Image (spheres, rainbow, N blue to C red):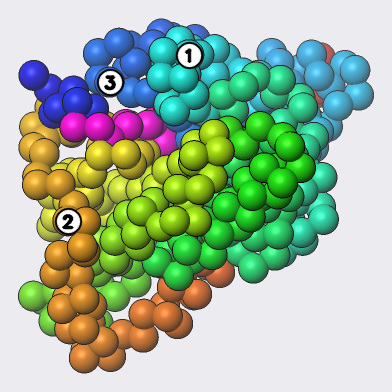
Amino acid sequence: MKATQKLHNLGQSLWLDNITRDLLTSGTLRRYINELSVTGLTSNPTIFDHAIKNSTSYDAAIRTKLKVGKSGEQLFFELALEDIKQAANLFRPTWEKTNGVDGWVSLEVSPLLAHDTASTMAAAKNLHARAGLPNVFIKIPGTEEGLPAIEEAIFAGIPVNVTLLFSREHYVVAAEAFLRGIERRIDAGLKPDVGSVASVFISGWDGAVMGKVPESLRDRLGIAVAKRTYKAYRQLLASPRWQAVYNAGARPQRLLWASTGTKDPKASDVLYIKALAAPFTVNTMPEGTLHALADHGEIGPTLPVDGGDCEAILTEFAKAGIDLGALGARLQDEGAKSFVKSWNELMTVIAAKSADLAKAG
């Protein structure tokens, strides 16, 4: 049995952290679903930037949209929604079989809105309506300004993938925003079963401290932060407040591990997959990591509910001069800026392709 199947059987969902038109039209994504236990998919501005920049598969669609006056951001979201809808339809049987627990596809609002609550909420409503499918998450960043938009989106019945979370503290405030939205729905007499995941980014922690801590701590920070966050997740799931809304018909917001491709060339290519096995969570991984897991991956022991040795390890990082709170805040800010950079590059690619295709007739 492949390690991908073992992980799925353990109760962790394997999602692909990639989308391209070639992936959809070649039958590759369908094969991943059938053979590698993939049950969902995430996207972000960087993924779409690479997809459109490195392929001619979008050229015909761009040419068609140019003829009816579409350009820039408007043109991009039409391309993205076409891909997202096709992927969502592939995962629809999974979504129906699991009663909406799994089988989700994620599309992000413009990263330019990460610090604009009202515009984020408006964009989330617009994209949700245009997607028109029940198994599409709208990704909203868990920044300070994004949190009110997350609450409002959940209250409005929009499924949300909370993105750009890096620490336990980021996760807890995002989970509370989700919970407030659900409680408001219950108070208003609305159905409370609105889907959501909270995406915590892992590998960036280790990259940020590489060369700044003793070799004995190499590649251990991201996993320790994940363990601390998982403990908080399990505590929240067990709390009377959360159980009250579940008893009223709500569904839990699952914890999702993001950025789980190994960046350190000296480390195992399945480092974060093996270390973060845990039931009732999601691990969204790049294609290379998915293939590595299927080829030679092993599943480690499941994450300890009590956080295991995380506090002892995090204390070692503190002794080495790492301010975890400040680093978490920096990683979130840098993550938001990285998506803005990818977004701007994406708009440049679309503008250049549009000009070339228009010139070519």
The spot of residue 192 in percent (x, y) is: 62, 36
Judge left or right: residue 119 versus residue 153.
Answer: right
Q: Position of residue 306 (x, y in %)?
A: 21, 63
Q: Is residue 56 above or below residue 207?
A: above
- Vertical comparison of 245 with 236: above or below: above
Eye-nearest disc, 3 or 2: 2
Residue position marked by numbered label 1 in the rendering: 96
Quadrant housing residue 89: top right
Q: Nearer the viewer, residue 217 or 230?
A: 230
Please tell me whether mark 3 sits on a helix, a strand or a loop: loop
Can residue 109 be seen in the rendering of this structure?
no
Task: Give x and y (percent) for residue 277.
Answer: 20, 44
Residue beneath disc 3: 37
In percent of the image, x 62 and y 22: which residue is there?
134
Q: Which mark is residue 304?
A: 2
The magenta span reads 10-17
Q: Is residue 16 magenta?
A: yes
